[in-house]
Image: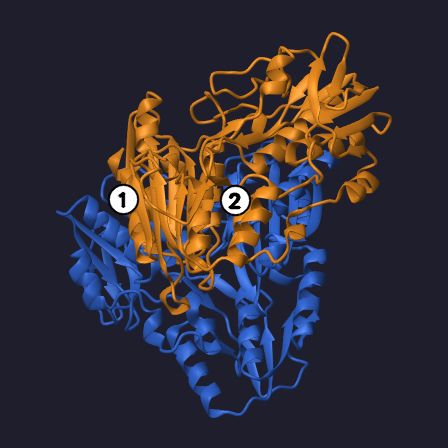
Chain colours: A orange, B blue
Amino acid sequence: MRLVVIGGVAAGLSAAARAKRLDPSLEVTVLEKGEQVSLGACGLPYLIEGQVRDWRQLIGFTPETFRQLKNVTVRTRAEAVAVAHARREVTLSTGERVHYDKLVVATGARARCPEGCMALHSLEDGVRLWELLRERKPGRAVVVGAGYIGLELAGALRGRGWGVTLVDRNTDLLHREDAELTALLRRLLERHGIELRLGHEGEAPDAELRLHATGMQPNTALAESAGIEVGRTGAIRVSEHMETNLHGVYAAGDCAETRHKVTGAAVWIPLGTTANKMGRVAGANAAGRRERFGGVVGTSIVRVCGVGVALTGLSVAQAQRAGLRPAAVRIASRDKTSYFRGRPVTVELVADRGTGRLVGASVIGEYGVEGRINVLATALQARMTVSDLLELDLAYAPPYAPVMDAVLIAAQQLAKEL
Amino acid sequence: MRLVVIGGVAAGLSAAARAKRLDPSLEVTVLEKGEQVSLGACGLPYLIEGQVRDWRQLIGFTPETFRQLKNVTVRTRAEAVAVAHARREVTLSTGERVHYDKLVVATGARARCPEGCMALHSLEDGVRLWELLRERKPGRAVVVGAGYIGLELAGALRGRGWGVTLVDRNTDLLHREDAELTALLRRLLERHGIELRLGHEGEAPDAELRLHATGMQPNTALAESAGIEVGRTGAIRVSEHMETNLHGVYAAGDCAETRHKVTGAAVWIPLGTTANKMGRVAGANAAGRRERFGGVVGTSIVRVCGVGVALTGLSVAQAQRAGLRPAAVRIASRDKTSYFRGRPVTVELVADRGTGRLVGASVIGEYGVEGRINVLATALQARMTVSDLLELDLAYAPPYAPVMDAVLIAAQQLAKEL
């Protein structure tokens, strides 16, 4: 039995390694079109920032070490251009045909980038931008797209002395539909000298450097040409077993849809950490198991000008659109006791009036932001109500938290509104 | 209607403030035997360490500000010595009688301390020790009791240049019954020059300074003399509404029992953060509401020699004693990506083989320890299984976490054991 995996990044490698571990008799081949596998693309903005000293730090495994450690075949510069499922064959750009019994499609996402613009999606993009920044004197840069990559890039360029304008055709940052959050972040960005133009196309401002951090879409061309269905999100539709409409063909990672556990809807939220989870399940099932992946609650975090901005679940506007009746509070508190120099932290909670359930949250601050959003993400997955949140037994000691944590204070406020 | 609250620290003040807010017509009086209310006793070790510059930083509210902000009467140096519930009367040490309609007992805990030993329980203890340390040259100190206060004290004294021996008659640190955890912490303490003697009484070692951080017990004498029942833990037995066996008399905070949500058993785990939650519910119910407090999962955290040690739920030994069939893993990982200088973090998970449920966890590391233990505490409260943990949608970005968090890695390992 041979498992072929198309794509050698997070989902593909997770699937390959897990399948081989569960069934060592399986012959596993990873086909990767680029020269490297296991790229941590989330680190590219930190290469630009200077935190990552060498692009090799972004590579989890070389093809050789992955091959040796996991005992799977890894072929780089092997671009799959067609899948003939009736014959169980993948055709490479060279014309070579590779037979499979089971197939995992992990073709990722790609950035649509207009001419004259640079994107920051591939390792090549990152290295090119990094070299360009070393050669040029800081000038004026425009970053198009105010999602998390755009924000990270804007901060990184500003940190290198560039004048930065961040532009997005939408009126909200981070695709959150949350005017208050956008206003908070606008003040933060402007305090750090980053100009924000929302509701604008990026063409207008003059700049020496134009970076594109928008227009990401799932890479589904190969899958679609093979008769694999895509969903309304544009990404590959999969069952909770990560199987596509073709029997024995799985999809995982940034090319695939998943389920939003709060709304129940199919969503496309491409993230490395989700890709790993999807890949593990796809690999297990390709190896004969029957595991499931239930979906995500939409957690993300980004560091902007030294401040952590973390989101999970739905904003008020998103909850309304999902047919819920949201109640929300946003409270300002401190992340630690005063004598441990507690700094401001903002916690927003969104609940559904009908059920009392938590449906979304955001946390902004300098310290402990990831911990607080993770508690709320866990609570979302567990379908906790605001009453449940009031009883959270969170760790307390002066170096780590105030005796009444901001999450509890916010829950107490929200309980009054329900 | 008059509500009297005996005790002016966490539980008492929470109860008083909440009752008044919910029913402004209620006349609320807090009786506190000391001179100060609202002492954050958890900060006392940090006064010794030097992190807290002035004991006033440990006071949340002065009696005057609490009175003004919350509109309740606060009487200091008012020691309740008897309760006659038939007459609804509290008698003070001066002989004065104070009438109540509803009563909240929040008399806290006390430290049994043998002669010649100093404890670190009251503000007076803290100030006395702090002054002593300023006057004396560092010498040899013995700290008796290897719970979290003992550990904090040992670290604080070591940091001030004292030679420190930490002694406990038990063989485990932090009352955890976890030999591996104890071994990990022993190495940490010894690396920082703190000698550890477990399974020893504290009398043997010679020292210029002997500190007692053990023998805490609930302060129930007043309650018991009034006919209020105590449970098997020695603390006041309360319903989930925080009511004692006497109608209209509530108890909250370190003098009261609560329920352990993992085992269902009554437990006595005195902590400020739990005291606040209990006090809020006691106050609400004294004001005519019908709220409940479901209990705790046993979360705690302590910083020892710069390392965070956090626990929640049950250890393997505790799970066995509770009649469960535990499976456990302890994994070592990194708290962040390598290019953000990820540091070691150890995560232990304990699950019940019968149900697959998580029943306990510990996390040790320098960064993000409180966030990880809080996720696991939330999962415990939600009665999540290890399979549920595999799907946790935790926040990922390079400055905050690795793409596969230590919590997820531990859950993946544990899933193989079940």
Q: Nearer the viewer, residue A131 or B262?
A: A131
Asked if labels 1 and 2 share a chain, the reply is yes
Q: Nearer the viewer, residue A207 or A69?
A: A207
Relative to B168, is A213 above or below? above
Name the quarter where the C terminus of chain B is drawn.
top right
Residue B248 makes an appearance in the image: no
**Residue A94 position within the rendered picture, expressed as x and y whole percent measured from the top left:** 76, 24
Left or right of residue B174, residue B79 in this image: left
Q: How many marks?
A: 2
Q: Nearer the viewer, residue B28 or A102?
A: A102
Query: Which quadrant of the structure image shows residue A344?
Result: bottom left
What is the three-letter code of the residue carrying label 2?
A: Val
Residue at the limit of the structure toward the right, as seen here: A25
Relative to A271, is B254 above or below? below
Residue under numbered circle 2: B375
**Residue A60 position within the rendered picture, expressed as x and y whole percent measured from the top left:** 69, 46
Residue under numbered circle 1: B284
Pointer 1 or 2: first along the chain: 1
| Chain under disc 1 | B
Between circles 1 and 2, the one closer to the viewer is 2
Kindly identify the residue that appears in the image at 77 percent across and 20 percent down: A95
**Residue A203 position within the rendered picture, expressed as x and y whole percent measured from the top left:** 35, 37
Measured in 3D between alpha carbons, the distance from the residue under mark 1 to the one under mark 2, in whole angstroms, is 28 Å
> For the residue labelled by badge 1, is the local secondary structure a helix, a strand or a loop?
helix
Relative to A82, is B170 above or below? below
